[in-house]
Image: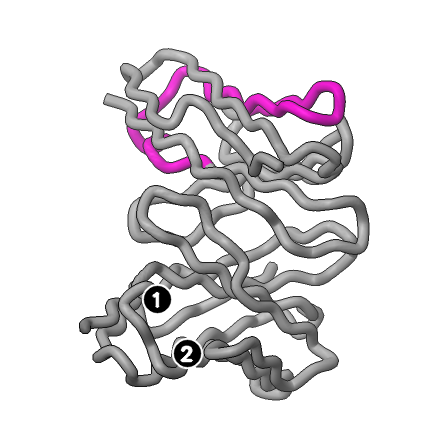
Amino acid sequence: GENVEQHPSTLSVQEGDSAVIKCTYSDSASNYFPWYKQELGKGPQLIIDIRSNVGEKKDQRIAVTLNKTAKHFSLHITETQPEDSAVYFCAASFDTGFQKLVFGTGTRLLVSP
Amino acid sequence: GAGVSQSPSNKVTEKGKDVELRCDPISGHTALYWYRQSLGQGLEFLIYFQGNSAPDKSGLPSDRFSAERTGGSVSTLTIQRTQQEDSAVYLCASTKPAGENEQFFGPGTRLTVL
């Protein structure tokens, strides 16, 4: 089955810096890769996703890149703000209309003012 | 409209007791998922519903765990004879009809088994 590894487990940056979180997956059949943000006491919320037919996707300050050959994908946050502080999860699945997402273990991002 | 809701938000129980956790998905969402989030871990898939049927229940850890969904809406996750290792946050998510990928998560139920 699919296995997703995520690094780092914690990341501390200064406001305005960039943050990068990396994930690797094991199943070459996976073709859908979402990123979720989880704030304290809340459920995860989708922030961006990418499919295997695309190498990069951007949405304002966040971007995701995918390297299918190496089976890794990364989340990039530019110009970080204190409100970006949260736990971020990557996930992977094979899209059959049913999203059995396999999640990474999460990265706790702390953005200091 | 309202998001996914879960109840109770917190549940403390004694080892050996049964618990029921409830999920109300977003109206019109046909697919519903249950996940378990242990401390410091990612989300672990438990079961998936399409309508009232469960095509994939492969993530249920043991036969003490069961879930049902009625009327294509509310779902209940039942854990019988709870054990301390069942302590975790149980999250529910729903998605729009086929073709949409985003899973909308509820706030979760934090279960503590003493």
Q: Amino acid at mark 2?
A: Ile
Residue found 64% across the figure and 23% down from its top:
B74
Residues marked 2 and 1 touching at CB (< 8 Å): yes
Q: Please check the rendered image and state whether residue B101 is part of the magenta-colored stretch, yes or no.
A: no
Q: Position of residue A61 (x, y in %)?
A: 46, 78
Element class at badge 1: helix
Q: Chain of mark 2?
A: A
Q: Determine the image quadrant of residue A67.
A: bottom right
Q: Is residue B40 visible?
A: yes
Residue found 52% across the figure and 78% down from its top:
A60
Left or right: residue A80 compared with residue B28: left
The answer to which of B44 and B70 lies nearer the viewer is: B70
- Report the magenta residues as a range: B66-90
Q: Quadrant of the C terminus of chain A?
A: bottom left
Instruction: Using the rendered image, report if marks 2 and 1 lie on a common chain.
Output: yes
Q: Which residue is mark 1?
A: A84
Q: Which residue is mark 2?
A: A77
How dense is the environment of label 1, judged by Cα within 10 Å: few (below 14), some, or many (20 and up)? some
Left or right: residue B1 compared with residue B39: right
